[in-house]
Amino acid sequence: MIETAPFGDDSATIEKQISAHQKTHSSLQRNPEVDRARDDLVRPKTRRGFERNKMSHSRLSQLRELQNIIEDISRAIMWVNEREEEELVFDWGDKNIDNYIPKKQESYSRLMRDLEEKEKELNKLKVKADGLLTSNHPAADKIEAYMDTLQTQWSWLLQITKCIHVHLKENAAYSQFFKEANETYTKLQKEHETIRSKFTCDKNTPMENLVELLRNLEVKEKERIMENRRQVQSLVNKSKAIVRLKPRNPEDKSSSPVIVQALCDFKQDQKGILKGNEGILKDNSQRSKWLVTGPGGLDMLIPSVCLLIPPPNPLSIGLANKNEQYYEAIMGIWNQLYINIKSLISWQYCVKDINYINTLTLSMLSKMRPEEYRSIIKRLETHYQEFLRSSQGSEMFGEDDKKNIQGHFDKAQNYYDSLIIQLPTYSKDTDTFIIYFLRIDLKNCPFIQVKVWITLPVLPQERTSEYTIIRFNSFPSSRSNRLTALKGLLQSLLQAEDVIKVHEARLTEKETTSLDPNEIEHYRSTLKQMKSELDHKRDLLNSLESNLSTAIHWNSQVPDSFHKCDIDLSKYSDLVNQMIDRWRRIHGQIDNRIWDLEKHEKQVKHYQQTSTSLNQWIDNARKRQDNLQLVKLNDIQVLTDHLNQQKSLHTEIKMKKDKVEDLQKNADSCAASIKVSRCSSRPTANELQSHYIELLTRSGDYHRFLGEMLKTMEELKIRNTKIEMLEEEMRRLKDELNDRNLKNKNLEDELARLKMELGGYKDQLISMEEIKRTSVIQVNATRESLDSTQTQLQDLNDQLTRLKYQLEDEKRKRRLAEERYTSQQDEYETAVRKRQKELEELNWARIDLEKSVKDKERELERMKILLEEEAARRRTAETESSKTTILVHESQSKYTDMLREKDNLLAKIKLLEQEKNRNCRSEDELNRIKITLETELRNKQRLQDEKNNIVKELTYIKSQYELRDSQIKQLNTDRDRGDRERQSLKSQLEKLMLELRTVEERYKNRLVCSEKEVSELTLRREALEREIKRLQQRPNVLTRQTQTDDKGTNIDPSKLVFDGVRRKVTAHQLCDCGIISKHTLDLLLKGKKTVEEIAIDIQVNLKGTGIIAGITSGSHGKMPFTEAKNRNLLSRDSAILLLEAQAATGYMVDPTFNEKMPVDTACSRGIVDTDDRDTLLTAEAASTGFKDPYSGKLLSVGQACKQGRINKDLALRLLQAQEAVGGIIDPVLGVFLPKDVALDRNLIDEDMYRALNKKPACYIDPSSGAKISYSDLRKKCTVEPVSGLLLLRGPDKPLTVKGLRGEVTVDELIKSELLTDSDLQKLNAGKLTSKDIEDKLKKYLYGSTCIAGIYDEVHDRIMPFYQAMKEGLLMRGTTLELLEAQAASGFIVDPVNNLFLPVEEAAKRGLVGKEFKNKLLSAEKAVTGYTDPHTGKTISLFQAIEKELIEKGHGIRLLEAQIASGGIIDPKESHRIDVDVAYKRGYFDKEMNEILSYEGDDTKGFFDPNTQENLTYLQLKDRCITDAKTGLILLPLKDKKKIQKKETSRTNVLRKRRVVIVDPDTGLEMSVREAYHRELIDYDTFLDLSEQECEWEEITIKGSDGSNRLVIVDRKTGTQYDIQDCMERGVIEKSSLEDYRKGTLTLTQFADLITSRTSGTEMSIAASTVEDMVTCSSPTQLAPSSPTVRRRFNSISITVSPPTVFDDQSPVGAIFDTETLEKITIQEAFRRGIVDMITAQRLLEAQACTGGIINPASGDRLSLQEAVHQGIIDESMATKLKAAQKAYIGFEDVKSKRKMSAAEAVKETWLPYEAGQRFLEFQYLTGGLIEPGTGRRISVEEAIHRGWLDGQGAQKLQDTKNHQKNLTCPKTKLKISYKHAMDSCMVEESNGMKMLQASSVSTKGISSPYNVSNPGSRSGSRAGSRAGSQSGSRRGSVDYTAYSYSYASTTSSAFSNNSLS
């Protein structure tokens, strides 16, 4: 019944079951039959009662475990459900969104923190549940069900947190948007009111106010409006991405269906919705769950937190559109105000001109020059035309106003014309005459004096003359004729003047023309008529000339006695010439005008034709556009056709852009060719252009709209298709559901049938129970014999009770200890070491205890097996119940056997007790506990029923101990953390105090300077005040100004501001730096020059001449450099340099929109990448200035470079860009200065000045990749005609093919002479494809003809090299050489699958091992290229050899492999090239070619495993075969059994061993001699390593007797050995020679065998294989003399082939038994009793913490598991050594998951101090502290630098004399340190392994306490001693029979003191 009893499903039910079972258990305990059964437990008949009692105990324990785990899981589920409920009921609507968003963000952060903490608890709970499931708990199904429920709820809560994150982000965006939108709306309202109230005007507003209003409107208000435009546009863009929150409120009713989107996956029954799917909201009346129609039309209830109502949001879009409309309204108001003000200004100008003309009189005009009064009417016409243009759309002027002003204009024009016509007549009537009296001498002649007035026209610089004509009787005729001629001349002059003035006036009246051809033709005919009229009046000129000549003639006839008019005639002659010249000019002006009109007429006709046709086309296109927009679109096909039509129309419209621009140019040319009246050409062209732009915009918008609509319809179609598919899937699932229901029904029927069968089985079980009861009655007689055991059982119970009391007492003591620990925290530093020591001892005791318990458990398991066998026999007896007597007899005999077995077990327990006593001798505090446990173990075989309880008690003790240990560790950790934080805070406080003092000093200094400056300013102010008073006392001379001074005005200098680079600069600053002169500054101050005029002159200094803005490509157009870089049109380096140049000259440029911006703005707009932001900000500081952290001043590039803020190369590059653009930028002024001025102003120094003069090539030409200066790069740019930007012409993307590691261009293949020009022509013509090129050049581009793998002839199989090595077919060195050849040829080859892989991929696939990976990656650099450490450039293998980046011999071998496998590899271009091309590119030279072509032994770097020969790679390839299937080259391995033995010797067989030293600082490989010359090693080391290098050669010589003798010779040293002689002397055996001839031994191994037995060198290296390559951190047994050399030597890497052996710093590897003269393991020495347990453990700890357990037989270092597997240590010892192994591999930090060293683990209290100090001593003595993960040795100095050790700890490590004496010498039985043990070791000559001597009897006369009565020890020690040779050398040799070892001692005296006995 107990076995079949059920388990409850919840805690309450289980509690009831526990109560019920406790009653049952008590009844079983009180049952006398059970008592007797317990007394007679070994009797078969009573066994059943005992088992029932045991099952009862187990049942009770299982119920309690189940109750605990279910309660824990239930609490976790409740916690998760509470958090889930909180989040499900939260309202994510828009109510109080501004309040709940910050609160919810805080609660979300708190929830995530709680989840992190809870996850840790759940992980512990899962471990606990997994433990119960692993132990096969009967209620495992219920535990799994609870855990599944918890896991499901936990996963669901995590899904909800993701949804919360999305809601927070979207709702925050919602809140922010509406906040910004409302603020913008308010701002627009204020702007609307401001612009309405501020800019009011009418016709009475003064002109000055109107101009001021216009300026404010154009500048300030427009900037404000444009700022609003950006904000409004941003809101419009954001509004499209705002989610909908209103519909989340159930009160919100929507007429259209609400679409919801799932934020996570959700399943309900058989229905579900996936993340991102959309559905229709049907009911959201419940806050937590919404009814949604999901995909496929299925309705389901989904938590509202999982749903989002996606954009678009009508509210956000409406609000954004409202703001946009408001902005448009404000813009309309601004436009209207602008038109009104402009029209008022032009109206006032026009009225002013009209009034002025109306005030003109003939008198005023007569005083003016012609150009003056012509300018008056011209100005009126200009202002009137301006008024007509500006008044269009103006609210200030209606049609009546316009007609009125036109009337005034016409009147004024007519009035002006009338004045012009009257002006000549007025001149005749009003001229002033000057009267000349002709005084005639009338001696003796009476006369009558008559005054005659002759009017002369007013001519320039002349006046009218008045003549007095005297009538007298006798007047000479010549004089009268002269007067007549003068009269005619004067009349002709007047007539000519009239004609000329009229024609000049007519020409002046019309100096302009219009665009009307009729008017042009009319005016041309008028001009022709004027010309003909002028020709008709040509006679006036002739009469002028004739009258002039007549007057001159008669004047010459006048007698000399009379007055002559020579002077007057000369003046009239000049007047005549002037008249003729004016006549000719009028004639020429008419001809010019006629010619201009004819030319202009042609242009006007062409312009009108073009404008008319274009206007008609625009009207037609507009109609077509309107018709297209009227079409209704309901189908995708119709939409597609419509889109194509719209696209063609849009394309046609865009094609007309050139015509519109041409029309505009024609209009400009017409206006420029001749002055056009009322400039009608420009408005017409502008109007056409505006109509065209409107049409283009409409077309483009509609085209985009159609595209988006087509995309939307396609998405709808796809969604409909998905819905249909989902409906089909739903139908299929319904069918499957019906099928499953049917299957379930069948299964239920089957279950009912099985239940019936189970009932029958239960009945049978009841009958069996009845039979069992009968059997119990039958065996009652046998129980009587077990009465004696009852007493023992009672004693055992008493002992168990005492043990429990003792355990409780121990718990109490531990609690007291913990309380004492808490109270003694002040004495922590002294107490912690003692505690750690106690904890360590407890730890070792616990480990020993667990070991003992495990041993006893194994014994109990064996007893259990015996008991089970007895039970089987008992069951046999039950079946034969008729033979009761016989069975009883047999039972008694078996009982006797069991008693005998019990006695044996007791004896064994006694032995174990003795062993336990020895183990616990040094642990006094735990003796009582251990004795109690040993007593318990002696009786353990009779307490099997109580075993589980005892184990539980021990587990409880262990858990309590671990808990206490963890608490102590936690306290220590907290204490250390607090100390560290305190120290950190202290150091930070000290740092802050130091900074505070520094700041105080700095500000004190500044204060002192400021006070000085204030005092100086005060003195200066007082001086200025005195000067002002003195000037005021002087006479005011400024009042005496000239007329010119009155006109000048002084301007405020603060208003004379120019726009510089990123800042404003004043005129005074420009004058100070020499950009403008003092004279120019004076002109600015007096207002004679404006800022704009000067800015044009100094544009280069203010803005520069233009930076390279971007790149232009034929296929992509113009683009920024970053986009070109992303499109691979520009390299990253070149792009960064060009962007730096932009930033350094002021702004980043977006060439697409011709915008300039700072770096941050460019980064936010995506013009530059975020990764480049910091670099460009540094470059931008070249224009804005680097801020000095001490003075706060701005520094220029040169000054920053001088202070070390930036490097010189960067500074030079930025300065070169500035100089090329306009000059060096002064960041304080923001202007470009010439180089010389910058030098004078200390912006750059002399070095930088000279460097700039050299014009270095700091930039990269994108087209060629060559270095180039920035100015030369600017010259290669093209200027965009529209924007004037400088653009680089980008390269077209070249055609490429696939290479070894990347793409290779076709141009490169042509340069490499792999393709010809004809191939390129075929490629361009399409006759040749990239695939054809790749196939043709496969040898050069991809494939490799290297040796791919091994062909095993024995098994007829193909395998990779590494697999062959693992199977023992290849030696390690040979494998490495062949794999390096593959890597250097391009790829590692998988010959089985015919794959070519890089090294990394090959390592992942297991083609190469981890031990080869680093070397193969180094060899692979022959393909990818080496990096030059000086220049950073990629160089080839040959160049790396030249620069000594790789050892020459190694590099030659790789080069040979490349050439043999297809050619030299160009690492830059990623393909192979021929040798001659390699010559040209410097990848090869003749000397290297000679080296590789020489086939001597020195160049044979590869090994043939079949013949044992050294070969070149090409020779080795010749011996290979080709796989028929794959075509790969395979190296065959011959079947050695088939090879006939040859007696002839091998001649001239050569094998080498070389030593390679690697410098860790540079990674250079070098020979021993090179290392010595570079002082990396000293002379002694050089000699020792040189001895290891050998070149063994086998030769055959003839002796004196004529016989052939085999001799091996070392070609380096000349050493030779005669093989026959060595055999005769017993140096080698014949079997060794046979092994050598068979090939089992290589030549080098054979030679090492001879040398090892013929000489006792201090340093002999035995290798298992010739080619093994081992890297050691320091040379074997060498101590460099020089301290400098010693420091370098400790870090260099030496590679020796064959491998190195153990050195002086290797740990103790084995024990040497001096009695049996054999080398044994430390564990075996412990078993023999010659080494105690503690010493053995310490010796093994030293091995484990320095690299692994040493196998004395092979010298290999093994992990603990491998050592246990090989039997070197047992499992109990492995358990004790785990901490030591972690000291090597690293302790894992639980938080950071990083590996900590032993020193760090001690510091963090992860490792007890005593054990940690011991491990550190072991590591220090064997070479240095070990870095986890890498195994690299760390010096004490570096450990201090890393913070592993403090000074005290380091000093303690270095003081080896005071190291802990924690070992017992196995020979002397004295306490020694590990250092003393290492010094006392013997050293095996063959491999240098240290062996510690041990014996059972102390050499000091002290018997060993560890072999007394040890059953495993020998009966006695061997008597006598063996004498050994002693010498004063560094090493002594002791020979014990056939064993040869070396004994190492530092001095001869030390050796003699340890003589062997």
Image (spheres, rainbow, N blue to C red):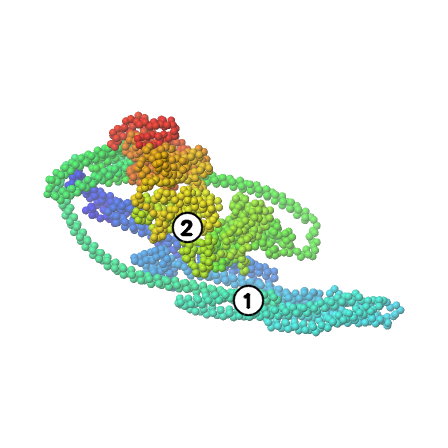
The residue that label 2 is drawn on is: 1462
Residue farthest top in this picture: 1901
Q: Is residue 316 visible?
A: no
In the figure, residue 937 lies in which quadrant?
top left
10 Å neighbourhood of mark 1: few (<14), some, or many (≥20)? many
Q: Position of residue 843 (x, y in %)?
A: 31, 36
Residue 206 screen position, x and y as percent: 61, 62
From the viewer's perspective, is 177 left or right of 4? right
Check the image and report above or below for 226 versus 1679: below
First in sequence: mark 1 vs mark 2: 1
Q: Position of residue 878 (x, y in %)?
A: 14, 43
Q: Give the side of residue 650 with respect to residue 348, left or right.
A: left
The residue labelled by disc 1 is: 663
1441 w.r.t. 326: above or below: above
Quarter of image, res 782? top left
Q: Quadrant of residue 1703?
A: top left
